[in-house]
Image (cartoon, rainbow, N blue to C red):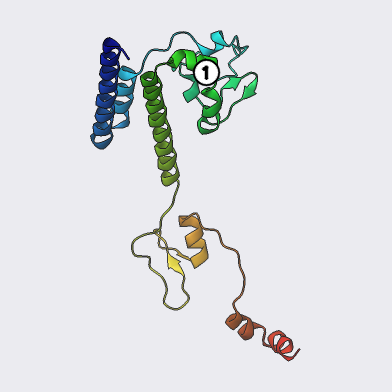
Amino acid sequence: MKEKEQLDYNESLDSLVNDLQHFIELSFHHDEISINEWLSKITNKIDGHCWEKKQCKCKDGTCPAYQNENRRCWLIAGTMCDGKVEGKFAQKFESCTECDFFNESVGTEQISKLKELVIVLIHSLQQKKANLEKALSEIKVLSGFIPICASCKKIRDDKGYWNQIEVYIRDHSEAKFTHSICPTCATKLYPDIIRDRADK
């Protein structure tokens, strides 16, 4: 490698390291908006559009990449490539890396490829974070003191009504009940049947 090429390489590598350090600091102390603003500053502009390069017939709006401000179609889920829906981001990325548009946009330099892979990784982490936050928001958790009758085991709700324990748990969590009967209660409720079975 020539001296100038080595200097350019080192400079590009230093820039990438600085970008990663900045991202780590943002991830510790800043919100999603700050990270997205930073990403828009460091990402290389993509020339052209995938549907133009691939001559896709997607102008009817069936492909989410069409007219999308993000020209990185490899980060967009559900794109229509060769007339087929590519599915989720994680499912389609491998085939995207083999696409002519991806390789021409990213370039052949190792530093450029590495930087793009870092952007893809950040995008993947952001998606996983969003999915986890969505899942957590849908989880109902029972906590605190729950007033329960010492005799019949009914639970008093916030409105003062007494509910069967399974009704209360069903209404305040994601749990679902299926009823059966334990051996002790079966003996108590159906002694003749249990006795007959024991004799056989």
Task: State which quadrant residue 7 falls in.
Answer: top left
Q: Is residue 69 visible?
A: no
Q: Check disc 1: other Cα within 10 Å, few if <14, some if 14-19, many if 20+.
A: many
Image quarter (top left, top right, bottom left or bottom right) of the N terminus: top left
Disc 1 marks which amino acid? Ala
The residue positioned farthest toward the bottom in the image shown: 199
- The residue positioned 25% from the left and 30% from the top of the image is 21
* Relative to 101, residue 14 above or below: below
Left/right placement of residue 54 relative to residue 8 reads: right
Q: Is residue 198 visible?
A: yes
Q: What residue is shown with label 1?
A: 65
* Relative to 130, residue 17 above or below: above
Image quarter (top left, top right, bottom left or bottom right) of the C terminus: bottom right
- The residue positioned 49% from the left and 20% from the top of the image is 73
* Relative to 40, residue 118 above or below: below
Which residue occupies the foreground of this view, 165 or 19? Answer: 19
Q: Position of residue 29 (x, y in %)?
A: 23, 35
Q: Position of residue 125 (x, y in %)?
A: 40, 35
Q: Position of residue 20 (x, y in %)?
A: 28, 28
Task: State which quadrant residue 145 falls in.
Answer: bottom left
Element at badge 1? loop
Left/right placement of residue 181 relative to residue 128 reads: right
Q: Position of residue 165 (x, y in %)?
A: 49, 67
- The mark total stands at 1
Left/right placement of residue 63 relative to residue 120 reads: right
